[in-house]
Amino acid sequence: MKKTFIVSLILCTIISQAQTLKLGGRFQKTQEMYWENGISAQYSFAKFKPNQFFVGFDYVTSRLGSAYNSNAIKQDNYIFSGSWQFNKSKPYHFVTRLNMGYFYSDLEEEIFDEIPNTAFLFSPEIGFTFDIPQVPVSLNFGAGYYIITEKEGYSPGTLQPLYFHLDIYYTLFKKHN
């Protein structure tokens, strides 16, 4: 209970200092592999490059994609990111992003215990964001490449390097400069 309170307090403090907070859904496709869907959050601080530098978190899983009601492998991605938006005064922005995180695939059966099922994630990404005028909705299209640092045979077989995604954000609040 005490940890939950402290985490909630820290989160509220961060959000109250944010210039812009965007929450939404993420739809991701790994090339020649699974659809993975999940949630995404991005926020910008009022005192450091507002509406240009964003820090974010994404949770993407095949449980809400290809593995939903199928025998596809259930896998989860926990991703922290930093992104930079160009053309901040216009409704469209080119975006560069650097992601770091953790990958886990649930192989379910004991016979697969010897097969690698976790990995550290690191990926550069490029994309395009469009802020829809008159409504607090943004569309973010991106493509990234997971840099797999493990030796061959030591990374999960379902972790493929190239991925594409669409994020649909709703801006909860936006402070004007």
Image (cartoon, helix red, strand yellow):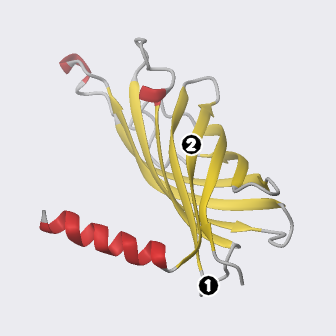
Mark 2 residue crowding within 10 angstroms, few (<14) / some (14–19) / many (20+): some
Amino acid type of the residue that numbered disc 2 sits on in the rendered structure: Gly
Mark 1: which secondary structure?
loop
| Residue at x 72%, y 84% (from the top left corner) | 177
**Residue that protrudes farthest toward the front in the picture:** 134
Chain-order first, disc 1 or disc 2: 2
Quadrant location of the N terminus in the rendered image: bottom left
**Residue that protrudes farthest toward the top in the picture:** 70
Viewer-closest of 125 and 25: 25
Rendering coords of residue 73 (x, y %): 40, 21
In screen coordinates, is 38 left or right of 11? Answer: right
- Classify residue 12 by image quadrant: bottom left
Mark 2: which secondary structure?
strand
**Contact flag, marks 1 and 2 (Cβ < 8 Å):** no
Question: Which residue is denoted by mark 2 in the rendering?
Answer: 25
In screen coordinates, is 117 left or right of 113? Answer: right
What distance separates the C-alpha of mark 1 from that of mark 2? 26 Å
Rendering coords of residue 124 (x, y %): 64, 56
Compared to residue 175, the image places residue 86 above or below, namely above
Amino acid type of the residue that numbered disc 1 sits on in the rendered structure: Phe
- Classify residue 141 by image quadrant: top right
Compared to residue 39, the image places residue 72 above or below, namely above
Question: Which residue is denoted by mark 1 in the rendering?
Answer: 48
**Residue 150: mark:** none
**Residue that protrudes farthest toward the bottom in the picture:** 47
Rendering coords of residue 133 (x, y %): 82, 57
Viewer-closest of 149 and 87: 87
Compared to residue 82, the image places residue 104 above or below, namely above
Compared to residue 58, the image places residue 163 above or below, namely above
Rendering coords of residue 129 (x, y %): 76, 54
